[in-house]
Image (cartoon, grey):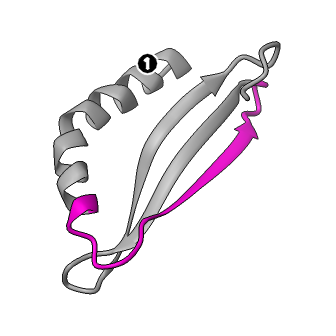
Amino acid sequence: ASRHEAMRHIAANFSLYQSQLTAKLQSSVSKVHVSSDLWTSPHRHGVLAICARWVDKDYQPKRALLGLQEINQAQPFW
């Protein structure tokens, strides 16, 4: 699978589960902790991930990917 196909698959799945994720985050019994990770693939493609971690109403730790963006290395991301 190409990286473009993988990115399309990820975007389609995120759209499908976006409303469910919103409800889960809103029902959190803890603060929602957001983190990011920026890395370069072996083929020199930059990727930025935004992740969330929280504790749900059953006091179970949860985590989710909130965003995944390919970064053009010639373009600053700030």
Left or right position of 29 against 77? left
Q: Quadrant of residue 25?
A: bottom left
Q: Residue at x 46, y 24 (%)?
A: 7
Span colored in magenta: 25-44
Residue sitting at the far bottom = 59
| Residue 8 spot, x, y in % from top left | 39, 20
| Residue 63 spot, x, y in % from top left | 40, 64
Q: Where is mark 1, residue-wise?
A: 5
Left or right position of 60 against 41? left
Residue sitting at the far right = 74
Left or right position of 74 against 19? right
Task: Count the numbered circles shown.
Answer: 1
**Is 2 located above or below residue 25 in the figure?**
above
Q: Residue at x 54, y 21 (%)?
A: 3
Whether residue 31 appears in magenta in the rendering, the answer is: yes
Q: Nearer the viewer, residue 21 or 42?
A: 21
| Residue 12 spot, x, y in % from top left | 28, 27
Q: Nearer the viewer, residue 28 or 39?
A: 28
Disc 1 is placed on an element classified as: helix
Q: Residue at x 42, y 66 (%)?
A: 32
Q: Is the residue marked by circle 1 packed among few (<14), some (14-19), or many (20+) residues within 10 Å?
A: few
Q: Quadrant of the C terminus?
A: top right
**Is 47 located above or below residue 66 in the figure?**
above
| Residue 57 spot, x, y in % from top left | 20, 79
**Which amino acid lies under the numbered mark 1 shown in the image of this protein?**
Glu
Left or right position of 56 against 50? left
**Is 40 located above or below residue 33 in the figure?**
above
Whether residue 71 appears in magenta in the rendering, the answer is: no
